[in-house]
Amino acid sequence: MFDSLSDRLNDTFDRLRGKGKLTEADITSAMRDIRMALLEADVNFKVVKEFVAKTKERCMTAEVMESLSPAQNVVKIVLDELTEMLGSTESKLVFSNRIPNVIMLVGLQGSGKTTAAVKLAYLLKKQGRSPLLAACDVYRPAAADQLATLGGEIGVPVFRGDGAHPIDIAKGAIQEAVDHLRDVVIVDTAGRLQIDEQMMQEAVDIKKAVKPDQVLMVVDAMTGQDIVNVVSTFADRTDFDGVIISKLDGDARGGGALSVRQVTGKPIKFVSMGEKPDSLEPFYPDRMAKRILGMGDVVGIIEKAQEAADAEQLEAAERMLREGFTMNDMLDQMKAVKKMGGMKGILGMLPGGQRALNQMGGNLDEGIFDKNEAIIMSMTKEERLRPSIINGQRRARIAKGAGVTPTEVNSLMKQWGEMNKMMGRMRTMANQAQAGGKKGKKGKKGKKIRMPNIPGLDAMGLGGMGGLGTGGPKSDMELLRQMEAQMRNNK
């Protein structure tokens, strides 16, 4: 969503890096460019004015101007101030000791409130809680049916209370949760196309009646400048606790969403990056700031990879080290990449990845996964386990079965060959390390070495990242810190 803003800011930074030493005129010019980039991205005028003033004041110090790398210091200051504008630190949901906890969602019609309720229920269910959805929107046609359908898809029950008043539905849902041992009730309230007194009063009345533990406002990232007026009104009337920003994967400028925290003082708790139930993510201000500045979100990639990798995949990784890389392994990795958001999703989280995508015009063929999957599925069980037996005749048969050309089969075979060679080198290193351990040269005796790759990245041709593994979190985080420091130095 912030592609244009990211490009504008990075162009400004590139001009600063082209100068050996910065003058006050250079800083002033850069701040003017940053100001225009933020305004054109729909960030609120007052927020931009305060942001630029604070950033310029910090950049004009002798410590920055006379440093060996003043441009890099400016980038660091912009990153710090942008992170502060977005909220500094993650703001988690707060749960009380009462059962059930009640989370109430408010917002305008069309903001994605109902789907946000379902996504939140899915997230809480993954965390081990037992959510119940309450369909309190009695005005929008088929609103309860939509919630019931989406809830059924993720295995979360929905309390409808057809024909009842919204307050009675909310109360009934709480009693239903008590009776059936559900520990969280998510109340989906009614919305309107625009703010009106009836809607606001109903939200206030429901809040008084059920006394929710958290009130979250769902905000459409594509709303634009008017987002400030909307969230300010809801903050005054409902005193919500936090914000869910929906549709952050859209093509709109999205800068209005960056203004929410600064205008209301309320934290952004979640962002929705897609249509699927698992597309709701906790909001990390520092990570979002880095992504806007083109620095990527490598930590986010690690987390997505660890979610995509289950116990069976970890066992498969160790088997690959012992026995080699099969077509079944390649198929599993491609599925893992899809689960992590596809190539565009992952590249967008890599430092400089979003900019590269923009330069390509967004023309990244995600269909290659489906094509390669069709090729692998056209192979026999023996061919998948022993790809080396696939000769010219077999390739022609596989290509015909998958509806592709023999050249495309050859391309996949070449990828497999490279991966198999890499596995061989890793197997050799693992054996040498284990032998060294037995001799007492290094480490503990017989220490296992896990496959150092994020599932799927090598299938995409990104295996060169090396070392981003499914090992312990301490080693991953330490590696990320080193990588990010190196990336900053290379800017």
Image: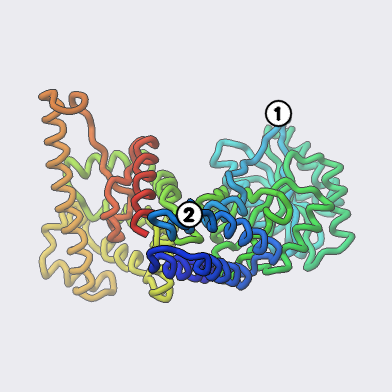
Helix, strand or loop status at disc 1: loop
Q: Position of residue 302 (x, y in %)?
A: 40, 47
Quadrant of residue 98 within the rendered picture = top right
Tell me if residue 335 comes above or below residue 375 in the rendering. Answer: above
The quadrant of the picture occupied by the C terminus is bottom left
Q: Position of residue 391 (x, y in %)?
A: 10, 65
Helix, strand or loop status at disc 2: helix
Tag 2: amino acid:
Val
Q: Is residue 171 visible?
A: yes
The residue that appears at 39% across and 44% down in the rendered structure is 481
State left or right for residue 342 relative to residue 203: left
Q: Is residue 1 visible?
A: no
The residue that appears at 68% across and 57% down in the rendered structure is 260
Tag 1: amino acid:
Asn
Q: Position of residue 281 (x, y in %)?
A: 55, 50
Tell me if residue 224 comes above or below residue 147 in the rendering. Answer: below
The residue labelled by disc 2 is 64
Which is nearer the N-term, disc 1 or disc 2? Answer: 2
Closer to viewer: mark 1 or mark 2: 2
State left or right for residue 362 relative to residue 204: left
The residue labelled by disc 1 is 97
The quadrant of the picture occupied by the N terminus is bottom right
